[in-house]
């Protein structure tokens, strides 16, 4: 009986796949990122801990969809800006000083989503989820400490550093994302939340050779993007 049910289910699945028309579409994508960082642990201090807020950015690139009935695979290649803002107090020249910091992280990102759409042709409401992988391609930071002159610089990729006055991040990021969208003809609007799973903090090596960990942090971002898809059926 079990074997018969499995054979019947497999036959129905193969029949549905055979009848479904595979459609490939590709096109430009552009949108807005509102990103921040998650710090799971805070450094113990005798003064008020720092606060972290989100910052705006943009993403742009190419997206595509391979549609099989109600389901679709949606890979993209995007330039994506992430980062965060922080403020608090730190010791500077043996004095407790207020600081503000703005960090921008630029990534080349490859998301790969599996989507389900209400319409068999990919039209209408859709929900999607999948992994993403990112390569850090640059960034910048601005730091203001009380009345001292502000400091600006480039964010560099590294896995171990000995200069604590600059800004570094891990070269690779990765995580999961999920969201919802709507497609009308060639236009596709999507809202996505991405959850970074890789610790981006870079360990610090002192002059004595000892390596100490820096506070771990992870990317978080909310994106809204519009795409225009063109393509063909097979």
Image (cartoon, rainbow, N blue to C red):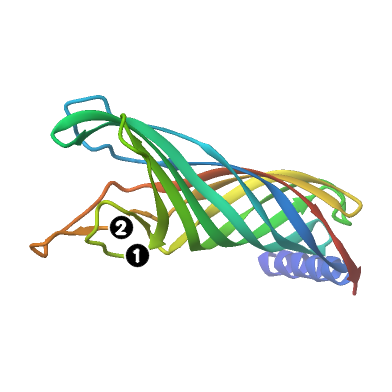
Residue depicted at x 16% and y 37%: 93
Q: Are marks 2 and 1 in contact (CB under 8 Å)?
A: yes
Residue 61's label in the rendered image is none
List the residue tagged with mark 1: 158
Give the image location of residue 114, x and y in percent: 68, 58
Residue depicted at x 81% and y 50%: 188
Which one is nearer the viewer's eye here, 84 or 227?
84
In the picture, measured across the screen, residue 144 lies left or right of residue 53, that is: left
Q: Give the mark nearest the N terminus, 2 or 1.
A: 1
Classed neighbour count for the residue bearing mark 2: other residues with Cα under 10 Å, few (<14), some (14–19), many (≥20) = many
Classed neighbour count for the residue bearing mark 1: other residues with Cα under 10 Å, few (<14), some (14–19), many (≥20) = some
Image quarter (top left, top right, bottom left or bottom right) of the N terminus = bottom right
Which one is nearer the viewer's eye here, 161 or 65?
161
Which one is nearer the viewer's eye here, 107 or 140?
140
Image quarter (top left, top right, bottom left or bottom right) of the C terminus = bottom right
In the picture, measured across the screen, residue 17 lies left or right of residue 203, that is: right
Looking at the image, the residue that sits furthest to the left is 208
Residue depicted at x 53% and y 38%: 55
The answer to which quarter of the image holds residue 10 is bottom right
List the residue tagged with mark 2: 202
Give the image location of residue 214, x and y in percent: 25, 50
Could you give the CA–CA distance between mark 2 and mark 1, rounded to whole angstroms? 7 Å
In the picture, measured across the screen, residue 33 lies left or right of residue 197, that is: right
């Amino acid at each position: 009986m079990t074997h018969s049910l499995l054979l019947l289910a497999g036959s129905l699945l193969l029949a549905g796949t055979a009848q479904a028309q595979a459609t490939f579409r590709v096109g430009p994508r552009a949108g807005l990122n509102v990103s921040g960082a998650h710090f799971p642990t805070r450094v113990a201090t005798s003064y008020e801990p720092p606060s972290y807020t989100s910052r705006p950015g943009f993403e742009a690139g190419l997206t595509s969809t391979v549609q099989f009935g109600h389901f679709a695979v949606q890979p993209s290649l995007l330039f994506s800006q992430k980062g965060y803002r922080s403020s608090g107090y730190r010791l500077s020249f043996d004095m407790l000083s207020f600081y503000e910091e703005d960090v921008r992280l630029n990534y080349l990102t490859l998301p790969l989503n599996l989507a389900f759409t209400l319409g068999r042709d990919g039209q209408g409401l859709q929900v999607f989820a999948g992994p993403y992988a990112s390569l850090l391609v640059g960034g910048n930071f601005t730091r203001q400490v009380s009345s001292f002159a502000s400091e600006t610089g480039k964010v560099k990729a590294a896995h171990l550093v000995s200069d604590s006055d600059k800004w570094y991040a891990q070269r690779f990021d990765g995580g999961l994302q999920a969201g919802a969208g709507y497609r009308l003809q060639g236009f596709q609007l999507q809202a996505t939340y991405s959850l970074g799973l890789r610790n981006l903090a870079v360990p610090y090596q002192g002059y004595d050779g000892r390596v100490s960990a820096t506070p771990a942090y992870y990317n978080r971002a909310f994106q809204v993007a519009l795409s225009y898809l063109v393509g063909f059926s097979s």
